[in-house]
Image (spheres, grey):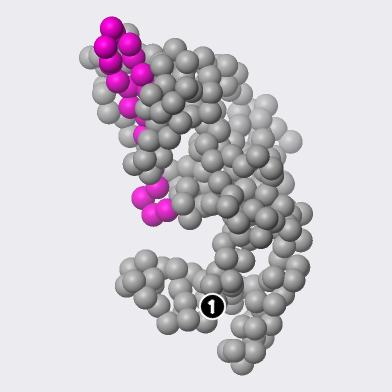
C-alpha cells in the first residue's frame, strides 16, 4: 500500500547513506575498481557488478564478478546497504515499521481466535517482498541495535544486529506458533528464518500468550494507516 509520507521522504537519500557514499571507504573502493577495470566506475556500474557477484554466487557457488572485490570492499558495500535498509525499512524512521501495524493486528486476532477455538484455521500464510518483511521485523522489535546505525559506523558497528543479509536472505520468513502446554498454559514461539527468537518483552522464546498479546495489542488496536501515511 502506498504511504505518501514515505514516498516523499524516499525522494531524498537518507543523510547517513549519502555521507557514507561520499566518505573515504566508498571513495577508495570506486577508485580501486576504476584502476583495476580500466574505466570510470559509476554507482550504477557498482550496483550491477555486485548483483552479478551475489546472484551468480548464490546459484553457482562462484562468480568471476566476485573476484573484482576484496573482502573489505564487500564489507563496505554491505554496510552501505544495511544503512539504506535501516533508514528505508527499519528503525531509522519510526514510520517505517509503524506501517506494519495491520500485520500485527491480524496476528493478535488470529492468536486470540485460535486460543479460544482450536477449530479455527491452524495454518495461515502470507507472502511479501523484502521491504515489507523488514518492516514487520522492526515492528516486533527484533534485531534492534542499542545505537542507531551511523555513517561512520563501518568499524564500530561491525557486529550490528541489523544486517539485511542475515535478517532477510532468500526465502526469509517469520513464523508464530501457538503451543498448548501443561496446565492449559498457552505460549507463543516466534521463529525468524526457522530459528526461535525471544521477542523483546517476553521472558524467553516461550512467551506466554497473555504477555505476547499485551505487548502488541495496543499497537494493533491503534493502527491508523491514514494518519501514519498522511503528508
Residue 170's image quarter? bottom left
Determine whether 95 is above or below 84 in the image.
above
Q: Which residues are magenta?
A: 169-188
Quarter containing the C terminus: top right
Tell me if 130 is positioned left or right of 113 in this view: right
Residue 113, given in percent of the width and then of the height, sits at 35, 13
Q: Is residue 155 on the magenta stretch?
A: no
Question: What's the residue at 73%, 58% (across, down)?
Answer: 152
Query: In the rendering, at what x and y percent does residue 76 appear?
Result: 62, 66
Q: Return the residue at label 1.
A: 69
Q: Is residue 186 magenta?
A: yes
Question: Does the image show residue 34?
Answer: yes
Vertical relation: 145 (above or below) 52:
above
Which of the two residues, 181 or 34, is positioned nearer the viewer here? 181
Placement of 110 over or under 64, stated as above or below: above
Residue at (69%, 44%) from the top-left corner? 148
- Which quadrant of the view contains residue 185? top left
Answer left or right for 120 relative to 100: left
The quadrant in which the N terminus is found is: top right
Residue 13 visible in this rendered orientation of the protein: no
- Residue shown at 55%/77% (left/top)? 70
Q: Position of residue 103 (x, y in %)?
A: 47, 29
User: Looking at the rendering, which quadrant does residue 75 occupy?
Assistant: bottom right
Q: Residue at x 76, y 61 (%)?
A: 19
* Camera-side residue of 136 and 126: 136
Amino acid at each position: 500500500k502506498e504511504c505518501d509520507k514515505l514516498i516523499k521522504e524516499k525522494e531524498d537519500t537518507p543523510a547517513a547513506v549519502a555521507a557514507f557514499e561520499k566518505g573515504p571507504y566508498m571513495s577508495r573502493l570506486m577508485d580501486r575498481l576504476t584502476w583495476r577495470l580500466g574505466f570510470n566506475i559509476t554507482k550504477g556500474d557498482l550496483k550491477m557488478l555486485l548483483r552479478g557477484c551475489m546472484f551468480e554466487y548464490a546459484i553457482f557457488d562462484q562468480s568471476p564478478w566476485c573476484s573484482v572485490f576484496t573482502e573489505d570492499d564487500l564489507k563496505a558495500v554491505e554496510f552501505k546497504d544495511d544503512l539504506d535498509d535501516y533508514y528505508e525499512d527499519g528503525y531509522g524512521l519510526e514510520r517505517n515499521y509503524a506501517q506494519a501495524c495491520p500485520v500485527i493486528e491480524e496476528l493478535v486476532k488470529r492468536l486470540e481466535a485460535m486460543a479460544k477455538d482450536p477449530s479455527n484455521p491452524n495454518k495461515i500464510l502470507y507472502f511479501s517482498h523484502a521491504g515489507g518483511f523488514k518492516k514487520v521485523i522492526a515492528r516486533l522489535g527484533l534485531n534492534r541495535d542499542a545505537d542507531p546505525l551511523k555513517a561512520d559506523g563501518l568499524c564500530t558497528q561491525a557486529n550490528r544486529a541489523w544486517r539485511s543479509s542475515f535478517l532477510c536472505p532468500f526465502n526469509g520468513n517469520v513464523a508464530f506458533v501457538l503451543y498448548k502446554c501443561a496446565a492449559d498454559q498457552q505460549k507463543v514461539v516466534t521463529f525468524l528464518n526457522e530459528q526461535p527468537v525471544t521477542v523483546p518483552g517476553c521472558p524467553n522464546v516461550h512467551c506466554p500468550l497473555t504477555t505476547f498479546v499485551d505487548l502488541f495489542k495496543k499497537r494493533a488496536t491503534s493502527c491508523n494507516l491514514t494518519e501514519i501515511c498522511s503528508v
